Image (spheres, coloured by chain):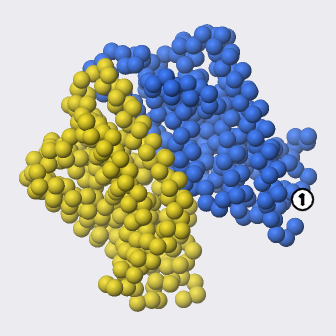
Amino acid sequence: MKKYLTIAKNKTQAEFSHRANVFAYIGGNMLDLFVQVVIWTAIFSSVDIVGGYSKPEMITYVVVGWIFMYLSTNYGYEEYIKKDIHEGKLSNYLIKPVNYLSYISFHSIGRLLFAFSIILLQALFFILFFRGTLIFSLNPAGVLIFILMFIFSYAIKFSISVIIGFMSFWASDVSGLYFALNILNRFLSGAFFPIAFLPATVAKLSYFFPFIYTYFLPIQFYLGKISLSGGILILAGQALWIAVLYLVIKFIWKRGLLKFEGTGI
Amino acid sequence: MNFNKYLAITKIEMSRQLQHRFQVASYRVGNLIEVIIPLIIWTVAFRSAGVIKGYTYDEMITYVVVGWLILYLTASYGFERVLALLIYDGALSQFITKPISFLRYAFTLGFSRSLLAIFLSLIIQAGVIFIAREHIVFRAGLLDGLILILMVALAVVIRLFYSILISLAAFWTDEISGVDFTASSIIKFFSGAFFPVNILPAFFMNLSLATPFIYTYYFPVQIVLGKVSTVSAVKGLAVELLWIFIMYAIIKIVWRAGLRKYESVGI
């Protein structure tokens, strides 16, 4: 366990050397939120309720959703895995007494801690800025469930990144596919608008994917549109997805290693 | 200027793009979702309102669908990263020793590189337009239509110049991904691709009008919607031309300064 903590620590420190680049992302991700707030403010200037959401509810959906999404992101970790596989660095881990899956889990946490703290500062700023509009209705049990949902969301998103990254065992250049999958992922998670806006059949379909558990359902719970017992059901759903994704990862990893040539080991 | 060699660049680059057809097509699937998102939001919003910030439902659908068509036509498809790599990898040295102008090469390459992507985008967008056909508004007359075509053609130049300019930053920094991400979000914002810029307070609207990017989305669509007079459209065209000259001058200056910085070990 200690060696993995060292990995996380080293990576956290390494991230500080890229601080200018990390800061450079701030403008873009703030604009992400700004755009949504502008659109909904414009719409709510002519309407009172949109698709069952009042203005404070929609602003909360967007702002709390943004914070939730950016805190649980792994910033395209699939790119790291892709590089490890394509550049042959994976061989390093295979011959060392270290488990690659554990390695990347801790490495990715170390990688995001710096960005995480910047997002926390931004979140604080947004909460202060929108304090007149934001809804907060969770009781202590609800807060606890919401925090658990957040941790599970991170695990789901990370597992998906690992699966996408492992596709590099078979494909050589997949940046276009990443782009399409990431947008589809955000779309089906409800990050662009509440899933309830979709035609009923598509909305039902999205419940069969893990994405909806990483944005729409947790934020619905936050807004009080889902009860406490409903919240526990969501947690169970998330746990189930984490287990399924873990099995998929194990399976692909075994198949991928058979394909991996590791020239020079 | 010998045209043949530039034509050869176009031919080579087009074959190269065909080799990456799956890749190029995957990006278009992502873009299609990006078009569907605002369509869904506006459709839900207009269920309970006839007019939002001066736009009717049909106008807003046209704004999104035709706007993206123009965006596709004028996009440079991440060309800045390709050019930046040339500088990092030292491939730039080839151009300094060959009888070819790097800036002209970059311009030709950028244009040719987009052809397959534009072609695929147009097919997909034609499908979207067909589905939304009953809601598409086209109010530009013959003269306005001509101005529109000119404006879009010039917008292609603006986007390419922008990509070249951003990539030249590679002379000074060795990681442009963060800057590129934020800069491209900002220009997309000012172009009006996220929403019509006139729903913003006048200050932002005026700010967008002062940028060259407004001609890659918002302004041409306003012509399609018949929301600008012919006189204003001509004025817009003049400002756009002015921007091209300004950007060209900046590129020349930055290029010269960058070359002084460039080490090109081995020449």
Disc count in the image? 1
Q: Which chain is yellow?
A: A
> Residue drawn 47% across and 34% down?
B194
Q: Can you tell which quarter of the image residue A244 is in?
A: bottom left
User: Going by the picture, which residue comes out furthest to the left?
Assistant: A229
A201 relative position to B7: left or right? left
Kindly identify which residue carries mark 1.
B97
> Residue drawn 10% across and 56% down?
A141
Q: Quadrant of the C terminus of chain B?
A: bottom right
Crowd around label 1: few <14 · some 14–19 · many ≥20 (10 Å): few
Q: Return the x and y of residue B248 as percentages of the image width and height.
A: 77, 37
Q: Secondary structure at mark 1?
A: helix
Taking depth in this image into account, of B148 and A24 the one nearest to the observer is A24
Taking depth in this image into account, of A5 and A90 the one nearest to the observer is A5
Query: Which amino acid type is shown beneath numbered disc 1?
Result: Thr
Taking depth in this image into account, of A210 and B46 the one nearest to the observer is B46
In the rendered image, is residue B9 in sight? no
A50 relative position to B171: left or right? left
A7 relative position to A128: left or right? right
Q: Return the x and y of residue B24 as percentages of the image width and height.
A: 57, 49
> Residue drawn 42% across and 60% down?
A115
Residue B72 drawn above or below residue A95: above
> Residue drawn 74% across and 27% down?
B242
Dot 1: chain letter:
B
Q: Quadrant of the N terminus of chain B?
A: top right
Residue A252 drawn above or below residue B229: below
In the rendered image, is residue B163 in sight? yes
Taking depth in this image into account, of B208 and A180 the one nearest to the observer is B208
The shade of chain B is blue
Q: Return the x and y of residue B223 as percentages of the image width and height.
A: 58, 17
Q: Return the x and y of residue A23 as percentages of the image width and height.
A: 50, 56
